[in-house]
Image: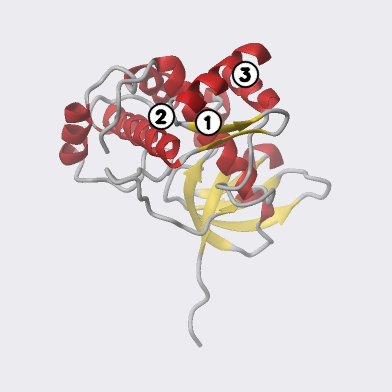
Amino acid sequence: MPREETSESVENFVKAVYVLQNELGMSGTGAAEDVRVSTNALKAALDISAPSVTDMAQRLVENGFIDYVKYRGVRLTAKGETLALTLIRRHRLIELYLVQELGYALHEVHDEAEKLEHAVSERFIEAIDAKLGAPEFDPHGDPIPDADGTFTQRELHPLSELPITTRGRVSRLTMTDSDMLQHTLDRGFTLDTHIEILARDPFDGPITVKLKNGQSMIGYTVAESILVEVNKPKNT
């Protein structure tokens, strides 16, 4: 997936648009390619001023990375999506390499990968990919795009939404806060852990879950960021 030379600020902006666009798509606002990301959402995500968002948006329109309509927001062009997926591929391969080869703890890798994704070469990224055996998922369970931008699609459900007696396995941890991530791991919700929902307190209360080595209780807010692949019913 070759790309032209771009600055770190451009890359962070394009990646933020991609992430927010897909969040809006998954929330039912519309298909990811149809929704637009507001200036306020980008301001919050990037921690920059609203005028800076507008200036960058106008600049990236000229470069062909985004489509911007005043008062309606931005969305990625095909060129912008290609850049975003390249960055996501870099980030997730670096995270996996840090965990598997360098012994980093899971809660430590995000910030390190954020820095490295802008600095390393494509040759380095492809070497990591080959070293790790062309992995499909990063250590959080996020799909790693192939060099052509395609990635594995799975049907996953937030643990917070699963009814009692549901069985499955933890397949993705989407929280970005390192303390919340470590809390989740400490509670036993590591990737590929098999779970069964035992009880749910009402009014978004904690959820009791059966794990391999006993039971664990997890708060509703944390459970929203634990995505589960539900077991398919056996044929009778």
Classify residue 133 as left or right of residue 98.
left
**What residue is pinned by disc 3?**
54
**What residue is pinned by disc 1?**
181
- Of the image marks 2 and 1, the number of the one nearer the N terminus: 2
**Residue at the extreme bottom:** 236
Viewer-nearest residue: 136 or 183 = 136
Residue 155 - label = none
Q: Nearer the viewer, mark 3 or mark 1?
A: 3
* Quadrant in the picture for residue 175: top right
Q: Secondary structure at mark 1?
A: helix
The kind of residue on which mark 1 rests is: Leu
Q: Secondary structure at mark 2?
A: helix
Q: x, y percentage for residue 16?
A: 53, 28
What residue is rendered at 70% in x and 42% in y?
220
Viewer-nearest residue: 234 or 157 = 157
Viewer-nearest residue: 18 or 107 = 18
* Residue 49 seen in the current view: no
Counting every numbered tag in the picture gives 3
Classify residue 235 as left or right of residue 98.
right
The kind of residue on which mark 2 rests is: Leu
Q: Are marks 2 and 1 in contact (CB under 8 Å)?
A: yes
Classify residue 141 as left or right of residue 131.
right
Query: What is the C-alpha distance between the residues marked 3 and 2?
Result: 35 Å
